[in-house]
Amino acid sequence: MPAKSRRSPPPPPVRSRAGALEPPSSAAADAAPSAGDALRVSRRRRKLLSVAALPFLLQLRDCAEGIVASAAELDIGEYTMIKEEVRKVVSKAKAAGVLRLVFHDAGTFEMGENSGGMNGSIVYELERPENAGLKKPMKILEKAKGEVDAKRPVSWADMIAMAGAEAVSVCGGPTIPVVLGRLDSMKPDPEGRLPEETLDAFGLKQCFQRKGLSTQELVALSGAHTLGSKGFGSPIVFDNSYYKVLLEKPWMSSDGLRNMQMIRTRSSKISRMLMSS
C-alpha cells in the first residue's frame, strides 16, 4: 500500500464573499509538506512498492527458470531416447545407406526459394530413380521411429538427421550434435534438385551454391563417400581414404576403374576441385 504522510493535509483555499480564492493562512502554510518532505515520501513509496513486489517477482523468475529447465530436460530426454533407439538399428554395415538417405532428404534444399531440405519429404520420393535403394535404410529407421513414437512422437526429419549423425559416429567419425524440432513436409519436394551425375565441375559448383555451399564445402561433403562399397578404403570406416584415392587417380587405368567400382566422371571432377581448393 502507498505510504501516508504523518502531516495533516493543508486546508482548502477560503472563498471570499466576492468569490475570489484567497490563499490559506500562514499557519496552514507552515503545516503543508515541503518539497523535501514530498521527495522523501515519494522515495519511501517506491521502496515500499519494491519490497511488496519482490516476492512476486522472485516467484515469477523461479517459474520462468523452472520452465526453461523443464524444456531443456525434455530436449535432453528426447535426444537421448531417439539416439538410443537409432543405435539399436544403425550398424556399421548399414551406415552408408543411412547416410545416403540423409543426403537425399536434405539435398533438395534451394536457398533462393528457401524450400526443401531436411523435412522428411523423402518418404514420398522413394520411387524416384535417383532414390533407388533407399527403401532399405528407410525400413531400418521405421523400427526405431516406431519405438520412439510409442513414447513421444518424433518427426521423420529429426529421425533421419539423428540417424545420419549416428551413422558417422558408429564408423569412427566425429560425434555430431543434432538440434531437434524439425517439422515434416506433407508432400514431396520438387524433382530435379539433387545433383545429376552428368554435371561437370562448373555445374556441380553452381548446383551446390544454390544450396548455400561453397566449393570447399562441396568437396568436404563429398568425403562422405568414404563409407560404402564404392572402393574408397574400408566401407565401414569414416576416414579420409576418399581423398587419398582421388589424388592417386585410379580411374586413369581400366583395371583401376574396375577394381575401385567408382564413377569415372564424378571422381575426376571432385578430384580437380579438391586440388584447386
Image: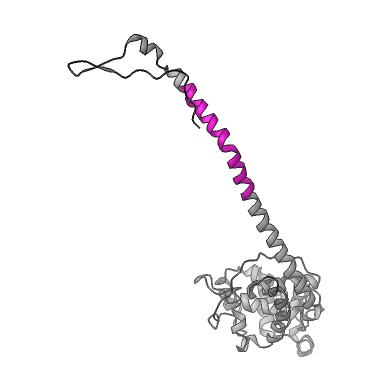
Q: Looking at the rendering, which quadrant does residue 260 occupy? A: bottom right
- Decide whether residue 43 is among the magenta residues: yes
* Residues shaded magenta: 39-63
Which residue lies most toward the left here? 18
Most frequent secondary structure within the magenta stretch: helix
Residue at 20% in and 18% down:
20
Q: Residue at x 62, y 69 (%)?
A: 215
User: In front: 227, or 117?
Assistant: 117
Is residue 176 shown to the viewer in this render? Answer: no
Residue name at image x 59 percent, y 84 percent: 124
On the image, the x and y values in percent for residue 150 come to 70, 75
Q: Quadrant of residue 186?
A: bottom right
Image coords of residue 148 (percent x, y): 71, 73
Q: Is residue 134 above or below residue 149?
A: below
267 up-or-down from 24: above or below: below
Query: As rendered, which of 166 and 274 lies closer to the eye?
Result: 166
Horizontal side of residue 30 vs 121, given as left or right = left
Which residue sits furthest front? 17
Query: Could you say which is closer to the camera, residue 193 or residue 105?
Result: 105
Residue 39 spot, x, y in % from top left? 46, 22
* Pick the front one: 165 or 61: 61
Asked if the magenta segment contains residue 18, the reply would be no
Is there any visible trace of residue 29 in the rendered image? yes
Residue 100: quarter of image = bottom right
Residue 1 placement (x, y as % from top left): 50, 32
